[in-house]
Amino acid sequence: MGEFDGKHCVVTGGTGALGSAVVARILELGGSCAVPVYDESELDGFAHASDDRVALTVGVDLADESAATSFYADVSSSGLWASVHVAGGFAMSGITETSLDDLRAMMAKNAETCFVCCREAVRAMRAAGSGGRIVNVSARPAVQPCGGMLAYQMSKAAVASLTQGLAEEVKDDGILVNAVLPSIMDTPANRDAMPDADFDAWPKVEQVAEAMCFLASPGNALTSGALVPVYGMA
């Protein structure tokens, strides 16, 4: 018996490096996953594309409120236990090189998509009446500010604030809401971007996924409103 036996979960960004690790861990623990996919090319190399416990919906733009709402409405018919929000984006630039459009793009990719997914997850969980778990992905710069990425930092700080406020709002529904705050993770893309870094100090996506899946699990009976650092030795 796995901790997620009979549990249906949404994993946004589920085809990416961290999202794939989250999907893999939920499957290992007996659960099933619904994964929204923006473009079919994201499925190239996705290890779980043919797993019958993974439901893929191609063409979902989470920045489009109606598309995200429709996706969650379909998912809710099967019941929803956990919604894990990995989808997002990253950008670096100094303040004088950052336009309002750049800031708005980061807010849309990170804060707005997270807000809409949280809202629709709450709607589905309330309809089921069995409580649930929401796990967001903020970032280390949201609580340990650094220069050169203000638009990203602001968008992830909004995710952190959303997490803590929502945890208070839905506590009487039995819905626990938390966020992890990764530092730079050990992914092929990050290794390519920073070839001289100490990769051993970076948290592995599997390790971050393990923390996220605990927060999303029935075994997490108490923790809500937490911003959990997952920095490794970085």
Image (tube, rainbow, N blue to C red):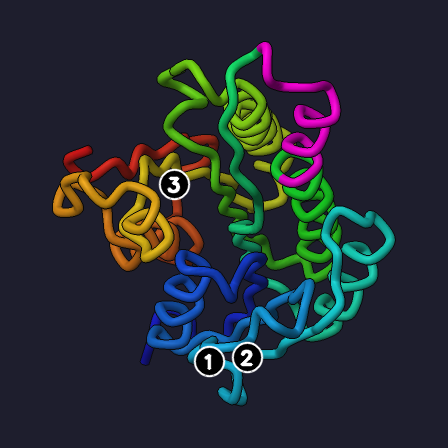
Task: Single out the mark in the foreground, 1 or 2.
Answer: 1
Measuring from the top left, give residue 108's x and y in whole percent. 71, 36
In depth, the one of 29 and 62 nearer the eye is: 62
Q: What secondary structure characterizes most of the magenta part?
A: helix
73 relative to 148, above or below:
below
* Residue 76 visible (yes or no): yes
Compare residues 97 and 60 and report the one nearer the observer: 97
How crowded is the residue under tag 3: few (<14 C-alpha within 10 Å), some, or many (20+)? few
Specify few, some or many for label 1: CA neighbours under 10 Å numbering under 14, 14-19, or 20 or more: some
Can residue 168 be seen here? The reply is: no
Task: Identify which residue is drawn at 46% across, 80% down.
Answer: 48
What residue lies at 47% left-to-right and 61% top-to-bottom? 16
N-term-proximal mark, 1 vs 2: 1
Q: Is residue 116 found left or right of 4 in the rendered image?
A: right
Q: Residue 72: horizontal and vertical position, in percent? A: 74, 61
C-alpha separation, residue under disc 3 versus residue under disc 2: 28 Å
Give amino acid for label 3.
Leu
Report the residue marked by disc 2. 54
| Residues marked 1 and 2 touching at CB (< 8 Å) | yes
* Label 2: which secondary element: strand
Which mark is nearer the camera, 3 or 1?
1
Task: For mark 3, give the secondary structure.
Answer: loop
State which mark lies toward you, 3 or 2: 2
Residue highlighted by disc 1: 48
Of the numbered discs 3 and 2, the one sitting upstream in the chain is: 2
Q: Disc 3 designates what residue?
A: 222
Q: Which residue lies furthest to the right in this view?
A: 66
The magenta stretch spans which residues?
Answer: 96-109
Q: What residue type is labelled 2?
A: Val
35, 122: nearer the viewer: 35
